Amino acid sequence: MRDAHRALITLAKKLGYTLDVAGLCHGFAVRSLEAYLLGDQDKLINRMNKIRDSENLDVLIHEAQEKLKRHEILTPND
């Protein structure tokens, strides 16, 4: 099993995000706070686990983006 922190950095790079010296911590902290305020902590944890456990999430994200460009309806899986 991969480290969730490393998985986030790897995914961000694969998606073309530029990482600065501050890293991803600020964004993750904000999303964690939002999840807490909305009562969605379980949803956040599930998403983090998917990021950690997926080797090809970037490919799946790009495929969903292409579907949107073609005005196709996304499935819950997408």
Image: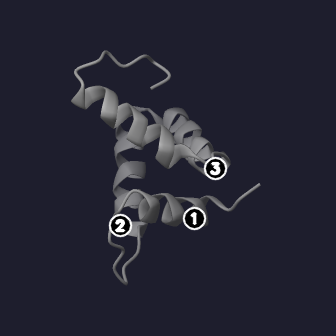
Q: Quadrant of residue 23?
A: bottom left
Q: Which quarter of the image is occupied by the N terminus?
A: bottom right
Q: Position of residue 57 (x, y in %)?
A: 53, 44
Check residue 55 in the rendering and tell me which mark sits there, or answer none.
3
Label 2: element kind: helix
Residue 42 versus residue 11 in the image, above or below: above
Dot in front, 2 or 3: 3
Q: Which residue occupies the extreme right position in the image?
A: 1
Q: Position of residue 35 (x, y in %)?
A: 40, 41
10 vs 23, left or right, is: right
Give the class, few, some or many, for how many residues have Cα within 10 Å of label 2's Cα (few <14, many ≥20): few
The residue under label 1 is: 5
Q: Position of residue 76 (x, y in %)?
A: 45, 18
The residue type indicated by label 1 comes to: His
Residue found at x 32% / y 27%: 67
The residue type indicated by label 3 comes to: Glu
Upstream in sequence: badge 2 or badge 3: 2
Residue 2 versus residue 46 in the image, above or below: below
Label 1: element kind: helix
Q: Which residue occupies the extreme bottom position in the image?
A: 21
Upstream in sequence: badge 1 or badge 2: 1
12 vs 17, left or right, is: right
Q: Position of residue 55 (x, y in %)?
A: 63, 50
Residue found at x 35% / y 60%: 27
The total of numbered circles placed on residues is 3
Check residue 26 in the rendering and tell me which mark sits there, or answer none.
2
Q: Between marks 3 and 1, how big is the CA–CA gap?
A: 14 Å
